[in-house]
Amino acid sequence: MGGFPLAFAQPLMLLGLISLPVLWYLLRVTPPRPQRIAFPPTRLLFDITPKEETPSRSPWWLTLLRLLAAALIIFAAAGPIWNPQNGPTASTAPLTILLDDGWSAAASWDARVRAADELIANADNNRRGVALVPLSEPARDITILPGGTARVALRQLTPKPYSIDRVDALPVLERFLRATGDSEIVWLSDGVDTGRGSDFTQGLTKTIGDRTLTIYDGGAAPAHALVAAENAAAKMTVKVLRASAGGPDAGIVRGLDAKGSPVGEAKFLFTPNDRETDASFDLPVELRNDIARLEISGERSAGAVQLLDKRWRRRAIGIVSGTTADTAQPLLASTFYLTRALAPFADVRQGDRGAPQQAITQFLDQKLPMIVLADVGTLSPEIRERLNAWIDNGGVLVRFAGPRLAQAEDDLVPVKLRRGDRNLGGSLTWEKPQHLSAFAADGPFAGLPVPKDITVNRQVLAEPNAALASKSWATLEDGTPLVTGERRGKGLVSLFHVSADMRWSDLPLSGTFVEMLRRVVDISGYTSTPGAGVAGETGTETVAPLRTLDGFGAFGPPPSTAKPLSADYRDRATSEHPPGLYGPADGPLAVNALASADRIAPLDFSALKANRASYTNAEPRDLRGILLSTALALFLIDAIIVALLGGAIASLFRRRAVSTVLAMALALGAVTGMPTQLRADQASDDFAVKAVSQTRLAYVITGNADVDGIVKSGLTGLTLFLAQRTALEAGEPIGIDPAKDELSFFPLIYWPIIPGAPKPAQEALNRIDAYMKQGGTVLFDTRDAVEAPAGPNGESQTPGMQTLRTILSSLDVPELEPVPPAHVLTKTFFLLSDFPGRFNSGPTWVEALPREDTDEAASRPARGGDGVSPIIITSNDFAGAWAMRPDGQPMLPMVPGEPRQREFAFRAGVNIVMYTLTGNYKADQVHAPALIERLGQ
């Protein structure tokens, strides 16, 4: 119905609405209008009290009420359905599902999977095969699968953290359709064109021919992206993109530091016609330099994340000049040109007026990453020694020539210089001013356009040698170097062979001068590598992946397909180079899903002859019951009104007042009481259906909102980890009240202990006791391992443990012991030696097992009892370690925060869940030798 989420199973029944005018007429003429007869002695009738009166016509509002009831019945007969399932039409041909699975699909991935799951279910009901085609995998063979297998394959798919090229999937799709023949095609699109979208739609038109195509687009959350973060002088800005210009849209961009702690937030707002806008962080430069990750709050997508490395830090640069003219004529001084050129992307600090060596000492004490020396000549041995040590540790020294440098002997230059300088009319003269010729292809200025309007009339010359060409970053037309540089230790030394003012060249007036300094500043962002093409490198340095983002924007270990990349990589992420951090942990290189110049656009489907459908965020709902119930209520109201108008109720009261009151009271009690009971039964049934529809973990609701929120997030994180690492695909965890809810539906109940909490009612404890005796397991977590006092049995002295003792005093608890090294719990899925959570100092207690002979115990691969321990006690705060925020980042820090502590906490959770589900099956391996021996006999 034109995009409205309402459909009718029997739309022809709506023709009954045409009868409403006829019904209106009939209701208006019934009952018939009484005749008026003139009777003169009417005064005799005035004293007669009428016993009953009948109106001459039905009131208009009563007629309208009846028409509304009739219309509701007609609508109900047409079978109205809210949020109907829409998509491909009925067919017997195989179903081919094209699935967009790039970063732009991550924000609405659940809706996409739900739509695909409904399509597969319908195809399975019609005994049709299904071919699942993720468009990010062009090398993947396409095969027709049964419905159940296709569902499993669907659950294994996750969005990729980079932009996909749909065109690459056309050849394999064409081969599949040629071999299959007839097929119905459904494209679950994300509606975002990240490049070559029109090529794909045109190619898809040729590939599918006259086959039926349905495109899902709309009805899902739109994708946003972050690009072009810039740390400017006053604030940090980042561009927020969206594919389509629609209505107003707003949100928040969060800035996080390297540890994931929030640094600041910035709001963004799209006007109806905007497809990009800016978010600005008005923070001090020290805080802005700490931002390592920008993300759109509430959106899970690699495109909604921009990682920042040292290139985005606004670096402090010290400028020292050896020219006295800088004070006498400040607008003509070299410091003026340098400050104007560096200010857009760096914090410029000028040395205090005085000797250059004092300013250099000041900047070295401040540990600036880059120092610029403009025509500074001879330096003392102490300063040279400190500068050399600073350069070896990663500092970048940029020097500009001038009369003082031309006459000095200094080793803080990349090449050996000739004494004196070369100018027009000098001993080494030019016939005309020289122009810039080229930038070295392997230097930091590679790719910059070569300006033809820059002239040089004076320079310092380098002594020719074999290494001069490799150290030259820019040269003049006669082949002499204009800029040279070399790597020293972890740092760099660079020399501009002209002055930083207008005396020797007009380079400082050009935009090229600004871009050249920007490239050099970019190099100063790294302490371990000088950047791209720095002279002295024998080859391009590569950096290995450190941590990468998944499609939802969460950090994880690099996939096996991730490859090292060059240290000067500036492009968008790819399948071989997923977004994330590369290189050493102390100075990584950030790679993002989108490059700074990338933009996104809406996909144009006009070239395709296709049916259109939309993603729905709710299950279909039949409205017939609601409409019929409303119509019945209107008819009851109509009957009451007619009785009131006709005087029947008044007559009834006069005749049988007491019995009428009792009857109405009983009717009212039935009307009000029955729905309550029905609602209670319905709620109980809904809880049972939800609990048994999937395997679910449960937790006891404590009443503390913070604790309950952390526990729910923790069990949700563990459920996701189980789905990623095991074959168990559990449902969403459920909070329970032991005194009211049925407990037997859950294999494991997590009970967080709150110190000082009142003891639960005895009825609730009795239900817990029965649950444990019937095979269930309760995991009690006091969450206070770090509060345990030192000494033996210190863990039993915490407030949480005292509260737990009060609870356990009313339960039939077996003898407990710390988990032995050979217990089956240590080998259920992962091999574990302990069970850390958010803390790792507390022991984990289980039911004590019978003692075994030494020889028998040595031969058993895993030790277990006759069943699963009904109780597990820990103080390590498992849920706190498992809890994840919606953006995939941990909710709470680890103590003491060992590198893999959270990973082992998740593994401990997997072992506990598998232990409660499978029992001691691994302990039964002890019977394997006896069984094999019997088979041999």
Image (cartoon, helix red, strand yellow):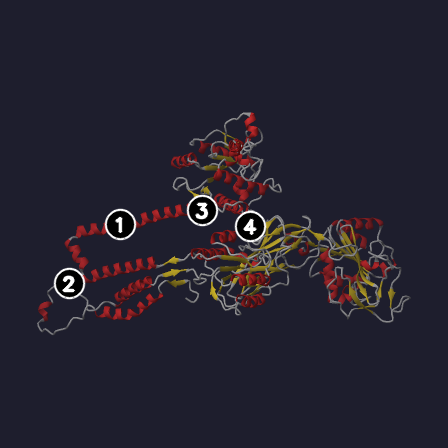
Q: Is residue 792 visible?
A: no
| Circle 4 residue | 888
* Amino acid type assigned to the residue bearing label 3 in the image: Gln
Residue 508 is situated, as x and y percent measured from the top left of the image, at 77, 65
Residue that mark 3 sits on: 694
Find residue 123 and report its image quarter: bottom left
Q: CA distance from mark 2 to mark 4?
A: 75 Å
Q: Secondary structure at mark 1?
A: helix
Q: Secondary structure at mark 3?
A: loop
**Percent x, y of residue 528:** 73, 50
Circles 4 and 1: CB distance less than 8 Å? no
User: Neighbour class for label 4 at 10 Å: few (<14), some, many (≥20)?
Assistant: some
What crowding class fits label 2: few (fewer than 14 Cα within 10 Å), some (14-19), or many (20 or more)? Answer: few
Q: Which residue is mark 1?
A: 670
The spot of residue 322 in percent (x, y) is 82, 58
Which residue is found at the position 25% from the left and 71% from the top?
Answer: 25
- Residue type at the position of mark 4: Gly
Q: Which residue is identified by label 2?
A: 52
Between the residue at mark 1 and the residue at mark 3, the CA separation in whole angstroms equals: 37 Å
The CA distance from mark 4 to mark 1 is 51 Å
